Amino acid sequence: MITIKEFEYSVNALKDMERSWYAKNWPVVYIMHNDTDAYVGETLDGIRRTKQHLDEETDTDYKLICMLTNKDFNKSVVLDMESFLIKYMSADQKYRLHNGNAGVVNHNYFNREIYQDDFREAWSKLLDLGLADKTLEAIENSDLFKYSPYKALTEEQKDALYRIMNAIKKHNVSGNQNLIVVNGEAGTGKTILAVYLIKLLKEITDQKLSFYPDEDGIDGMDYLNAFAKKIGNMKVGFVVPMQSLRESLKGVFSGVDGLSPDMIIKPTDLEDDVYYDLLVVDEAHRLHRRKNLAQYPLFDNVNKKLGLDENGTELDWVIKRSRMQLIFYDSAQSVRPSDIDRTQFQTIVDQHQCEQIELKSQLRCKGGNDYVEYVKNVLEGMARKRQDNFGNYDLRFFDNPDELVVEIQKKDKEYGLCRMVAGYAWEWKSKADKNAYDITLNGKDYRWNTKAVDWINSDNAVNEIGCIHTVQGYDLNIAGVIFGEDIYYDKDDDCIKINSSKYYDSLGKTKDADKLKEYIVHIYETLMTRGIQGTYVYVCDPALREYLRKYF
């Protein structure tokens, strides 16, 4: 049973604390707060730690301190619970949290799974006390939680972070221009790592780095203090090419202490006379080249301003406007001719001193790396046998689109964030006529996503169908993927082919048939890896449906 008690945050309240069995020489988690701000910590001596906080100079005037513990708690448990509360309270937004993110831990210990029930019980009591507003389920479906800088990194992400920071430290001292490329497939945690690093760098720049050291090297205060001395005051920008994801991340940054939406920029903002010490680029596979653009004059003007000819790309702009660059990249998610292709990307990278880092572990899909690799092999014609063992991943194949729609809507009521998505295989008539429908399946009409920005979280999203440009970069609990008639199976040639006349993305067209097939297959691979809990599939082309049935 969790014990929770709130005390006045003052010297006078220390005597009251002394009467509590857990306030001295016992592991506790505490929350200091006023009406708008909070700080979460852990200690083995609540009275001593409270005295230390009261003696510290701070800009925040806390009024109360809440202590949480259990007679079964130990040091490992309170470290874990502290990280749990930081992660969830920051996304709950009842308070503006003043914690740093460098000390967030994620380690295993004896009976950890049992203590998780205590954490959920603690959250329920915080709700009852008015110290939290949202349920854990609602928080877990929010963008602020999914992209939180307070996520504990995996060992692979920690190793990548350590290498990135060492490269930044080395090249900041030398003054040389340097490019760091982090390669990772969909769901390997590229955006989480980017946001985590930016939060950490901002704390260092603002000289607000504070946490209690863990034994891991990257979390050590000595390492971070040495790093801070080497980098000094850095100007950091976050380039996000995709409009919908950019606006969602701005919402996240507005809710995190120390971060600002102004830190997030679109590539054309690099026209401004601002030079950065470091530019971080997420979803860099969606950076543009001069091909199939909606606005050629704008693109040409930026190239001219930066002293580039028409062959200049948005990656060139990033390099021109910064001394160091950190690029998060996945060539398999390039879905339009306007995207810098992998050959051109590699040519630009090879012209600069570059460090390559790999993220390989699948963090989104519960089907893991095996599921993601299997989807690619099936759609690219390399699968040789059916595979069914993806753990608890809910992978289903539907013969009737009506049944898929019903199941997605049913699961959305149960979990939230369950959406239908599809290849760009229907005209977007509703853009010009709001009363028009775009997609007909089994005699029933549907519309494409009616919002370009944050469609996934919009009120009517579960009744609409999202396109690739609305969902790329996002997580869903369950994705209902509809294969349109832009992709089909040729029985005579025994292979998957594409039908360019049924592909309606005007900016996605190209006369290169092989390249167009690559884009369309990339779209479906990306859609098939959006679902965390599962993926439901319906295929319009009967021959392709029967072909894929062998594999799903």
Image (cartoon, rainbow, N blue to C red):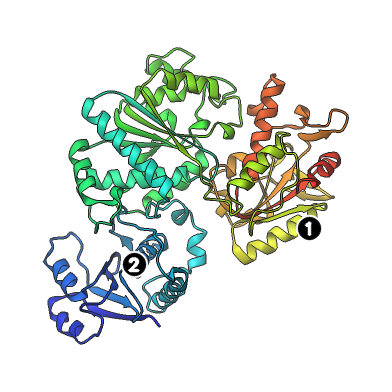
The residue under label 1 is which amino acid type? Glu
| Residue neighbourhood size for the residue with mark 1, other residues' Cα within 10 Å, grouped as few (<14), some (14–19), many (≥20) | few
- How far across and down, in percent of the image, does residue 411 sit? 66, 62
Residue drawn at x 64%, y 59% is 392
Q: Could you tell me how far apart the alpha carbons at marks 1 and 2 are, in whole angstroms?
A: 47 Å
Residue 294 is left or right of residue 87, and the answer is right
Residue drawn at x 25%, y 34% is 169
Would you identify the image quadrant in which residue 351 lies?
top left
- How far across and down, in percent of the image, does residue 286 sit? 52, 32
| Residue to which mark 1 is pinned | 403
Residue drawn at x 80%, y 46% is 550
Would you identify the image quadrant in which residue 334 lies?
top right
- How far across and down, in percent of the image, does residue 129 sit? 37, 78
Residue drawn at x 60%, y 64% is 415
Is residue 503 or residue 343 the one in the foreground? 343
The secondary structure type at the circle numbered 1 is helix
The secondary structure type at the circle numbered 2 is helix
| Residue to which mark 2 is pinned | 76
Residue 333 is left or right of residue 72, and the answer is right
Is residue 180 or residue 318 the one in the foreground? 180
The answer to which of marks 1 and 2 sits earlier in the sequence is: 2
